[in-house]
Image (cartoon, rainbow, N blue to C red):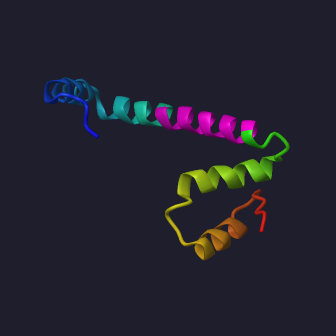
Amino acid sequence: MDDTSSAAKQIYEAMIMSLSPGERLLMACRMYDTAKTLMIAGIRMQTPEANEAQVRAQFFLRMHGTDFTPEELKKIMRELPNMQVDD
């Protein structure tokens, strides 16, 4: 679905491109930090009993769960430090 007018898209693109590359990078980093904070809060709300290792595992799955096969995910998660995988 695309409900943004082409004029609005052009204005937004011009605003973004008026920023320096460093400012755009900082903006992207802030957006990632916000998304990470929201995801972790959501995980903690759904599973308040989860320990840090379980939260890390759930975060990883939310970020990369569709990027790999189930077998690849298990292998990757076993190799990452401080992550508890519930088989």
List the single residue furthest toward the bottom.
71
Secondary structure character of the magenta stretch overall: helix
| 11 sits left or right of 58 in the view | left
Whether 84 is drawn above or below 20: the answer is: below
Q: Is residue 5 magenta?
A: no
Q: Position of residue 34 (x, y in %)?
A: 55, 32
Residue depicted at 61% across the width and 68% down the height: 73
The reply, left or right, for residue 32 in relation to residue 42 is left
| Quadrant of the snapshot with the N terminus | top left
Occupied quadrant, residue 43:
top right
- Residue range highlighted in magenta: 31-45
- Looking at the rendered image, the quarter that the C terminus falls into is bottom right
Q: Is residue 35 left or right of residue 79?
A: left
Along the viewing direction, whichever of 47 and 11 lies nearer the viewer:
47
**Relative vertical location of residue 56 with respect to residue 79 in this rendering, above or below:** above
**Residue placed at 14% from the left, 30% from the top?**
6
Seen at 85% across and 43% down, the residue is 49
- Number of numbered labels in the structure image: 0
* Along the viewing direction, whichever of 76 and 66 lies nearer the viewer: 66
User: In which image quadrant can residue 2 be found?
Assistant: top left
> In the image, residue 23 lies at what x, y percent?
36, 29
The structure residue drawn at horizontal position 54% and vertical position 36%, both measured from the top left corner, is 35
The spot of residue 67 in percent (x, y) is 49, 63
Above or below — where is 40 with respect to 72?
above
